[in-house]
Amino acid sequence: MAYTRPSIEEHPDLLELRAEYERTTATNRGQAIEAMGLVTGTYLAASPWIVGFNGLSTITVANLIAGVAYALLMGGIGRGFERTHSMAWAAAIIGLWTIISPWCIAGSVATTRTITNNVVVGVIMLVLALAAATMRPGANRMRREMPDHPTPGRRV
């Protein structure tokens, strides 16, 4: 009789971890972070035309590329959190780049419009990416498993 070893994909701990990742992204917080990340990335990509600095081609291209990359990174969190959770740190780097890019890009692109737009959007991107990076599986499970202890002076 030949014994076949099950693959690692069928390991009960791995299946439970995947289910926990799914529960983490199914929370209101996870869905809100993903949605706001998609909107923020899309706005950054379109911001040169919305704010009116699309004549400055270098910052226009930089915002377009950074915005699309950010939207793709943040949009993937809900669908494959176990694989993209660490990519939230890359999204945070894109947020930092967005903040400093008006001063780093060649040409005279550091205008009031580009600086204001990129700093505000970059800070929002950074906060959202850090919120996505700090989402961790098991936080909800720990709250569910903790017994309810009555607070002193409160009738149960």
Image (cartoon, helix red, strand yellow):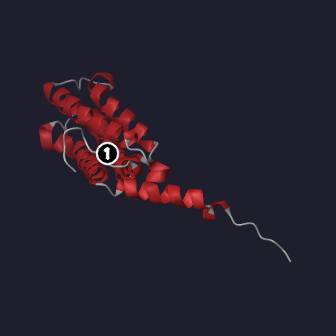
Residue at point 34%, 58% (across, down): 26
Q: Nearer the viewer, residue 19 or 78?
A: 19
Residue 76 showing in the rendered view: no
Residue 66 lies, with reference to residue 140, above or below; the image says above
The percent position of residue 58, horizontal first and vertical second, equals: 30, 34
Which residue is the site of mark 1?
A: 149
Residue type at the position of mark 1:
His
Residue at point 17%, 25% (across, down): 111
The percent position of residue 3, horizontal first and vertical second, equals: 81, 71
Residue at point 29%, 40% (across, down): 128
The quadrant the N terminus occupies is bottom right
Instruction: Assess disc 1: are there few (<14), some (14-19) or many (≥20) residues with their C-alpha within 10 Å of its C-alpha.
Output: few
Residue at point 38%, 39% (across, down): 134
Identity of the residue furthest to the right in this view? 1
Residue 123 lies, with reference to residue 25, above or below; the image says above
Residue 8 relative to residue 50: left or right: right
The percent position of residue 141, horizontal first and vertical second, equals: 41, 51
Residue 7 lies, with reference to residue 67, above or below; the image says below
The part of the image, by quadrant, that contains residue 136 is: top left
The percent position of residue 71, horizontal first and vertical second, equals: 32, 49
**Secondary-structure class at tag 1:** loop
Residue 43 showing in the rendered view: yes
The part of the image, by quadrant, that contains residue 123 is: top left
Q: Nearer the viewer, residue 11 or 59?
A: 11
Residue 83 relative to residue 58: left or right: right
